[in-house]
Image (spheres, helix red, strand yellow):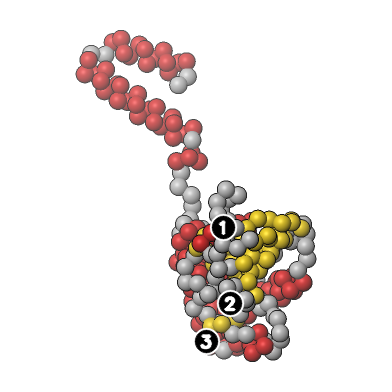
Amino acid sequence: MNVLSKHMHVKVCLKLPRRSRELESWLKVILLFMAFHACYPTELAVASPKEFPEWDQGVYAEINRRHGEKAAQRMIDVVQFIKVHLNDPVEMQLEAVNDFMNEMSWIADSELWKQPDYWATPFETITTFGGDCEDIAIAKYLVLLLLGVPDEHLGFAHVITSDKEHHMVLLYKASENQSALVLDNKDPDVKTAQERPDLLAVYIFRNDGTVFTIKDEGNAKRTIKDTLENKRLKKWLTAKERSRENTRSYIPFNGGKPLAPVWLREYN
């Protein structure tokens, strides 16, 4: 309230009868609330909902031409899934993505790609709707990025299962003080790392090149043994480059528009 308004307020209070003064008091409360709202717009305003870009039908037609009708329909289903869950809380997005992607068939690389160890791009995994643990974890990762989950909260863990199998899972960590959540194609539920003593952690890597080697004493007692910066994982870099090339190849069928939303213009 400026000086002029303050003096006017005192003058009115002196002249108004009791009933009018009560009305004036209510007006004062309303004015104070309006002033508070004006001072803190970011605190009270509701964030604008995210919108996923519409793809031209030419994209799906080209997927149909390259990979078949079933592949095109699967891509339509994935895009629709993203739109449905785009503005859900992160916890709900994690559960939904884990459920949705775990419906894919597990197929060994030797059978699907005729290679002993091939890391498929998310597009390859979705169009074939199958893959091994690395492929499914990478597909979950990209869908979560498309849903707006920040990259710095996500990572991949190379683990050994209780059956002595080498395995990969996706991790989500909200903050340093919170336990990581595990998205596993072998488990229908998203669980904390402490709830997965059956997984013996070997190392964790992130998209930015950071690798954490893990000391795992069993029974979910894990500590970081070493941190390596800018570690180049060849299979990861190769998969990302193939993904970029694949995305670029579909832009002409989308009227020249990017396929990714504004918060993720490229699969980095």
Label 1 near label 3: C-beta < 8 Å? no
Helix or strand or loop: what does disc 2 sit on?
Answer: loop
256 over 71 or under it: above or below? above
**First-in-chain label (1 vs 2):** 2
The residue beneath circle 2 is: 163
Cα separation between marks 3 and 2: 34 Å
Could you classify mark 3 by the number of other residues whose Cα lies within 10 Å: few (under 14), some (14-19), or many (20 or more)?
A: some
Asked if one can make out residue 173 in the rendered structure from this viewpoint, the answer is: yes
* Residue ID at (62%, 58%): 222
Where residue 82 appears, as percent x and y from the top left, is 50, 68
Q: Nearer the viewer, residue 77 or 138?
A: 138
Helix or strand or loop: what does disc 3 sit on?
Answer: helix
The residue beneath circle 3 is: 70
**First-in-chain label (3 vs 2):** 3
Where residue 18 appears, as percent x and y from the top left, is 22, 15
175 over 43 or under it: above or below? below
Cα separation between marks 1 and 2: 22 Å
Could you classify mark 2 by the number of other residues whose Cα lies within 10 Å: few (under 14), some (14-19), or many (20 or more)?
A: few
Where residue 204 appears, as percent x and y from the top left, is 67, 63
Helix or strand or loop: what does disc 1 sit on?
Answer: loop
Q: Nearer the viewer, residue 215 or 91?
A: 215
Left or right: 36 as drawn, with respect to 239: left
68 over 32 or under it: above or below? below
Amino acid on which disc 1 is placed:
Ala
Amino acid on which disc 2 is placed:
Asp
Badge nearest the viewer, 3 or 2: 2
Badge number at residue 180? 1
Could you classify mark 1 by the number of other residues whose Cα lies within 10 Å: few (under 14), some (14-19), or many (20 or more)?
A: many
* Residue ID at (68%, 66%): 202
**First-in-chain label (3 vs 1):** 3
The C terminus lies in quadrant: bottom right
